[in-house]
Image (cartoon, rainbow, N blue to C red):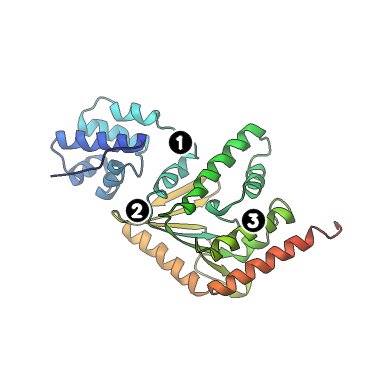
Amino acid sequence: MEMSRKPRTPREKYGEELRLRRITAGLTQEALSEQVVCSPTLISHWEAGRRLPKPDDAQRIDIALNTDGFFVRWLADLDSKFAQYFAAVAELEREATEIRQYGASLIPGLLQTDAYARAVFQAYRPNYCAEELDDFIVNRTERGRLLTRSAAPVTWTLLDEAALRRRIGGPHVMAEQLRKVVDMAESGRLRLHVLPFAAGAHALLESMLYLLKFSDAAPLAYVEALRTGRLMDDPALVEACQGSYTLALSEALSQRNSVAFVRAVAEEHEHAQHQPHRR
């Protein structure tokens, strides 16, 4: 007999309805996955409310369950405040028991200060409006509260030296941002490691990487590029991403040396703001 907890969010309610309709139709997750053309694991994520199907997936669900467009119509009402390619990740990270993140050229979103995030969004959107920026900052700040919960996920943060030195928002903003990262590491809210330029080539040169583990579901991996992102649940791909993270981590500085390194770079930024501007 299949059991589930009471749905709490719109996504969970969507998933619970999918589960109930599937059972009524006499289908297992495996049987439904064959008709929707996806993995049984993905059906499990949908039913748990961790992810939402894409429109074409929802259409195939309606056909398989003979629900006359029900899941397609409901899906349209579940608009996210995040970019479409990141919306599922934003939902999933709240359920994760462990997060491993790598920042290649940016400080990861969960760790960003308001000023740093604002500078990033301004760079992405040259024709921005203040109200739109404020909404983005609120959303990012809410995500960051994940790491302040009493049951916060174990969080590993691997930062390339490039992410520390690129002066986003100016020297004061960077100094403030890096001090926040140091404070979080020293307070035990994250495990911090730095990949210095001296490490040379490493396994994550080509991409940022976000790894999520759960207590009751298979792990996931997420990578992102300009205006796009990919969430991976294929076991072989996720395992390969985990292996790449482990390899890169082996080239990084220790936690203690990383904290000292980040603090030193923060001081360099702080010192720079007091120097005369040179062209």
Q: Quadrant of residue 15?
A: top left
Residue drawn at x 47%, y 50% is: 146
The answer to whether one can see residue 243 in this image is yes
Q: Residues within 10 Å of mark 2 (few under 14, many from 20)?
A: some
Mark 3 and mark 1 residues within 8 Å of each other at the beta carbon? no
Give the mark toward the camera: 1 or 2.
1
Q: Position of residue 126 (x, y in %)?
A: 68, 39
Q: Quadrant of residue 180?
A: bottom right
Q: Position of residue 266 (x, y in %)?
A: 69, 63
Mark linked to residue 177: 3
Q: Amino acid at mark 2?
A: Asp
Mark nearer the N terminus (2 vs 3): 3
Residue drawn at x 59%, y 52% is: 112
Mark linked to residue 179: none
Q: Position of residue 34 (x, y in %)?
A: 22, 44
Q: Amino acid at mark 3?
A: Gln
Q: CA distance from mark 1 to mark 2?
A: 21 Å
Residue drawn at x 24%, y 48% is: 40
Left or right of 270? Residue 138 is left
Q: Amino acid at mark 1?
A: Ser
Q: Mark 2: which secondary structure?
A: loop
Left or right of 193? Residue 56 is left
Q: Mark 1: which secondary structure?
A: loop
Mark nearer the N terminus (1 vs 2): 1
Mark linked to residue 233: 2
Q: Mark 3: which secondary structure?
A: helix
Q: Quadrant of the C terminus?
A: bottom right
Mark nearer the N terminus (3 vs 1): 1
Q: Residues within 10 Å of mark 3 (few under 14, many from 20)?
A: many
